[in-house]
Image (cartoon, rainbow, N blue to C red):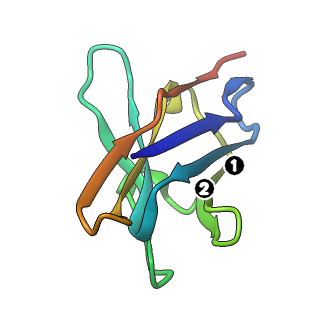
Amino acid sequence: QVQLVESGGGLVQPGGSLRLSCAASGSIFSTNVMGWYRQAPGSERELVARIFGGGDTNYADFVEGRFTISRDHAKNTVYLQMNSLKPEDTAVYYCNFRGTLRSMRSHEAWGQGTLVTVSS
């Protein structure tokens, strides 16, 4: 199947920056979209940003130009650069993969999540 390994979370002060990474591996034939979602305590999981196979991106309204999603095709890794972080950005961030396996079956996978805490 597909394994997603996330890294880069941690504690940062308001106004600070973090970069999350998500490396995908496994029996991948093609990637339709990779993205980042987040879930704060007591809230539902929500989309933060995603990047499509052709390179198009879209962002949640609350990002307001502070985050940038990018992808390294050679490494099959997606990044989320987060700047001007706010306390309300505190959440567990999850990487998501949607694509096709070498078996030609569609597949979706989630990472284990990485905690981002924005606090002084």
To which residue does mark 1 refer? 83
Question: What is the total number of numbered labels drawn onto the structure image?
Answer: 2
Residue type at mark 2 is Arg
101 or 17: nearer the viewer? 101
Quadrant of residue 105 within the rendered picture:
bottom left
Residue 48 in view, yes or no = yes
Q: 71 left or right of 33? A: right
Question: What residue lies at 69% left-to-right and 30% top-to-bottom?
Answer: 14
Q: Is residue 51 something that shows in the picture? A: no
* Residue labelled with disc 2: 66
> If the image is split into quadrants, where does the C terminus sit?
top right
Above or below, 85 relative to 120 = below
The label number, if any, that marks residue 53 in the structure image: none
- Rounded to the nearest angstrom, the CA distance separating label 2 from label 1 is 5 Å
Q: In which quarter of the image is residue 44?
A: top left
Q: Residue at point 60% right, 56% down?
A: 66
Secondary structure under the numbered disc 1 in the rendered image: loop
- Element assignment for label 2: loop
CB-based contact (under 8 Å), mark 2 and mark 1: yes
Residue 10 image point, x, y percent = 70, 23
Find the residue positioned furthest to the bottom.
Answer: 54
Judged left or right of residue 58, residue 117 is right
Q: Badge 2 local density, few (<14 within 10 Å), some, or many (20+)? A: few
Q: Which of marks 2 and 1 is nearer the N terminus?
A: 2
Q: In which quarter of the image is residue 119?
A: top right
Give neighbour class at mark 1: few <14, some 14-19, many 20+ (Cα, 10 Å). Answer: some
Q: Where does the image place residue 39, in percent across and percent down from the top left? A: 37, 28
Tell me which residue sits at (47%, 27%) in the image.
Answer: 112
